[in-house]
Image (spheres, grey):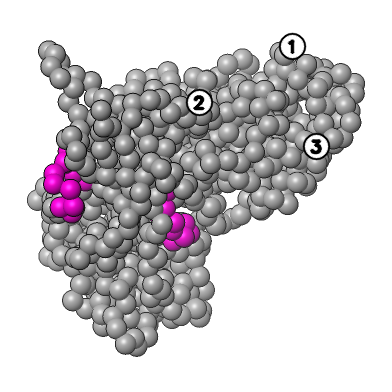
């Protein structure tokens, strides 16, 4: 791999546990730095039911929730069960911001009633689930269902926020019951609708999503429709105060007379609602004449009009399905924003085995009408993981085999597509996600292409950036070439502010040189830097290679990140190549100088026991099943996520013999909060008069993307005994 190229010009390629049941006895292992908390429990098979709203009743796994009545909404207050549903990832900065007047793109996710496999907060073993990964093309993600209050599953919120996309829930009323509900809170005095609005704001604020789509699909009495603009204004004002960047959108349904009468446009009949919030989402049966008429009532707020496009193409629509681009073309012609409803059509109605091909085809037809967005914060780290896979891999090492699905584990996704050089028969590069192999997670980015005889290299843009570059930057690329190709792989960066941008030098960085390449003299080598660079310059297992570079810049704006493929020196033949990208990192050197936080104050609570099912063919039960909740303390802004492991230990031994040997811990799953629910963990039954033991380990994954040594993971042990008879 070559050193990254940095062109000078802006456009060149280039809980407390009850004392009577559990005894906490912290102790320290001699060989490890982290203190281990020890808890004790007596095995009991009595049920300890968890709240049905927050936990799956079959498994006790935490789940996303919705609210079905006004009473539920008004009674909701943040509690312990809500912690699993709070997003870890804040909305990442991007350019242009949502506040710009550029036409926007909203995606409204409506799939088979909602809350499918995505409701499982810690993931599931779903095979062939739906996923969305073209985040760089959209601005807003709405999670839609027909429950009164649709709270977005936190996995979607984390994935969207990681890409700088706002996430909205849905407040919907329908049919006769909806009319009665609206009469209850809209037809009375101010306090009634303000109480509803206050709870909606609190939900968004505590669970860290970004606002609401208000969808009133029933007729309203004169009193109720008269208060609706006031409700919208109050909700919008309060949300803006409590949720920075928050949004309230109105769906085109009820008109100012109170009738349920879809307009398919913004006009004098629904403008009062538009004027009371952040925008309107129109119905879908419009023609170009509707778009032309909207310029007047929209005024300077054209971008706040989200023209609805039903991807299922139901009704009298311009275009849906694989003709959705026809609708987008007209919408953009008139400078309006677009709201794509149910693009999961490609999953619901087409062959599941061809989902990725159909998804890529659908979005490739729209890209000319979907302006991209730029990342504008560091560190930037991605393994291209889609949040699903057929196995789990950690830095090239296979950890588990079998399907898994965890939307919140999706890493930043690139700009997908195909780049062709000008002229017939010239070079090309194409990218797509691939589950066949991975460096970290469940997938990688597959790049295929051809270098024609007459050119030296081809390149494809993966990410658009707008980052003021710090004086010193560290970059890393993990890749794998397939077959016998001899092409050389390089990162290319483009920089802005060419008149003042100074490139001070590029040098290789590896494990042996990392202590020498630090921004300023230190008395001891920076620990985080040494760990970040631990694999740099090495041939890794499975054919993966990692290359790291240190880049000195001054007065520069990082604009684009490409990956380039060039032929070997002296080569003259057309060169085909297949390359798998496993990870890209762009890190501010200063961020690797700060001390690494530690996981602290681990506790074990909500313990439940079950006897394991007897083996097939009969026989005695094969041990126990343990479920419990782990809590810990860690500054969340420093974490990408947490990896939760266990050592099941043994069913007993002489009391006081200490912990078991250093067998490799088994991965249980990922956490995106300071808590994790262990579900149905198989453990050995404790022998009479002896303790069984299971150990839990919490591995923090820093935002800069490096491995934390096991000695620095948080740890807690649970000692358990069978009840005396």
**Real-space CA distance between mark 2 and mark 1, rounded to the nearest whole angstrom:** 28 Å
Residue 631 left/right relative to 30: right
- Secondary structure beneath dot 1 equals helix
- Secondary structure beneath dot 2 equals loop
Query: Is 636 included in the stretch rendered in magenta?
Result: yes
First-in-chain label (3 vs 1): 1
**Real-space CA distance between mark 3 and mark 1, rounded to the nearest whole angstrom:** 23 Å
Q: Which of marks 3 and 2 is in front?
A: 2
Residue placed most toward the observer, 223 or 501: 223
The mark found on residue 194 in the picture is 3
Residue placed most toward the observer, 491 or 528: 528
Residue placed most toward the observer, 335 or 224: 224
Q: Image quadrant of residue 519?
A: bottom left
Q: Can residue 708 be seen in this view?
A: no
Residue placed most toward the observer, 565 or 95: 95
- Secondary structure beneath dot 3 equals helix
Query: Is 656 included in the stretch rendered in magenta?
Result: yes
Identify the residue position indicated by label 1 in the image: 176
From the top left corner, tell me how far across and down residue 388 is, in percent: 33, 37
Highlighted range, magenta: 630-658
**Real-space CA distance between mark 3 and mark 2, rounded to the nearest whole angstrom:** 28 Å
Identify the residue position indicated by label 2 in the image: 52
From the top left corner, tell me how far across and down residue 41 is, in percent: 33, 40
Q: Nearer the viewer, mark 2 or mark 1?
A: 2
- Label pair 3/2, CB-CB below 8 angstroms: no
Residue sticking out furthest to the front: 725
Q: How many marks?
A: 3
116 to 706, vertically: above or below: above
Residue 541 left/right relative to 646: left
From the top left corner, tell me how far across and down residue 664 is, in percent: 16, 50
Label 1 Cα neighbours within 10 Å, binned few <14 / some 14-19 / many ≥20:
few
Residue 79 left/right relative to 627: right
């Amino acid at each position: 791999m070559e050193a990254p190229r940095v062109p000078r010009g802006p456009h060149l390629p280039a809980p407390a546990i009850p004392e009577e049941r559990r005894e906490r006895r912290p102790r320290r292992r001699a060989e490890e730095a982290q203190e281990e908390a020890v808890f004790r429990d007596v095995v009991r098979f009595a049920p300890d039911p968890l709240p049905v709203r927050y936990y799956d009743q079959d498994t006790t796994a935490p789940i996303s929730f919705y609210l079905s009545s006004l009473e539920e909404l008004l009674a909701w207050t943040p509690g312990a069960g809500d912690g699993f549903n709070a997003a870890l990832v804040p909305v990442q900065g991007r350019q242009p911001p949502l506040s710009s007047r550029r036409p926007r793109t909203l995606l409204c996710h409506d799939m088979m009633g909602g809350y499918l496999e995505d409701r499982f907060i810690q993931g599931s073993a779903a095979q062939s689930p739906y996923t969305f990964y073209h985040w760089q093309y959209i601005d807003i993600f709405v999670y839609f269902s027909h429950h009164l209050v649709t709270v977005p599953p936190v996995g979607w919120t984390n994935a969207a926020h990681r890409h700088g996309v706002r996430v909205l829930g849905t407040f919907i009323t329908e049919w006769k019951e909806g009319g009665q509900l609206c009469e209850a809170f809209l037809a009375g005095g101010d306090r009634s609708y303000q109480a509803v609005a206050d709870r909606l704001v609190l939900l968004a604020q505590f669970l860290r999503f970004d606002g609401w789509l208000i969808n009133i699909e029933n007729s309203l009495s004169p009193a109720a429709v008269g208060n609706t603009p006031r409700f919208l204004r109050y909700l919008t004002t309060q949300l803006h105060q409590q949720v920075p960047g928050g949004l309230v959108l109105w769906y085109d349904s009820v008109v100012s007379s109170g009738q349920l009468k879809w307009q398919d446009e913004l006009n004098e009949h629904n403008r009062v609602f538009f004027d009371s919030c952040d925008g309107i989402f129109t119905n879908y049966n419009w023609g170009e004449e509707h778009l032309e008429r909207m310029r007047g009532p929209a005024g300077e707020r054209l971008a706040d009009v989200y023209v609805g496009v039903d991807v299922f193409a139901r009704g009298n629509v311009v275009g849906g399905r694989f003709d959705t681009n026809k609708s987008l073309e007209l919408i953009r012609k008139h400078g309006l924003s677009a709201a794509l409803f149910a693009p999961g059509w490609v999953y619901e109605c087409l062959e599941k085995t061809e989902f990725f091909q159909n998804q890529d085809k659908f979005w490739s037809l729209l890209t000319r009408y979907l302006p991209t967005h730029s990342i504008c914060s560091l560190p930037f780290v991605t393994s291209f993981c889609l949040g699903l896979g057929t196995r789990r891999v950690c830095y090239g090492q296979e950890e588990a085999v079998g399907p898994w699905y965890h939307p919140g584990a999706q890493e930043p996704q690139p700009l997908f597509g195909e780049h062709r050089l000008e002229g017939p028969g010239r070079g090309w590069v194409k990218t797509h996600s691939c589950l066949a192999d991975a460096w970290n997670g469940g997938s990688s980015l597959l790049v295929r292409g051809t270098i024609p005889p007459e050119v030296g290299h081809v390149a494809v843009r993966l990410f658009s950036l707008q980052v003021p570059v710090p004086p010193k930057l560290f970059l890393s690329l993990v890749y794998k070439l397939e077959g016998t190709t001899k092409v050389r792989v390089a990162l290319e960066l483009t920089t802005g502010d060419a008149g003042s941008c100074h490139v001070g030098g590029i040098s290789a960085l590896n494990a042996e040189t990392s202590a020498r390449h630090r921004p300023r003299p230190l008395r001891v080598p920076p620990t985080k830097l040494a760990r970040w660079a631990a694999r740099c310059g090495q041939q890794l297992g499975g054919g993966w290679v990692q290359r790291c570079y240190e880049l000195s810049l001054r007065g520069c704006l990082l604009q684009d990140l490409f990956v380039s493929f060039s032929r070997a020196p002296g080569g003259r033949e057309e060169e085909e190549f297949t390359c798998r990208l496993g990870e890209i990192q762009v890190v501010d050197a200063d961020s690797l100088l700060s001390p690494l936080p530690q996981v602290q104050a681990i506790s074990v609570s909500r313990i439940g026991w079950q006897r394991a099912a007897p083996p097939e063919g009969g026989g005695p039960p094969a041990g126990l099943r343990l479920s419990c909740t782990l809590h810990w303390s860690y500054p969340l802004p420093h974490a990408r996520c947490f990896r939760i492991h266990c050592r099941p230990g043994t069913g007993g031994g002489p009391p006081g013999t200490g912990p078991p040997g250093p067998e490799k811990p088994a991965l249980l799953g990922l956490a995106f909060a300071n808590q994790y629910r262990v579900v149905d963990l198989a453990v050995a039954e404790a022998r009479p008069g002896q303790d069984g033991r299971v150990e839990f380990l919490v591995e923090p994954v820093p935002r800069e993307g490096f491995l934390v040594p096991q000695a620095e993971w948080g740890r807690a042990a649970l000692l358990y005994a069978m009840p005396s008879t």
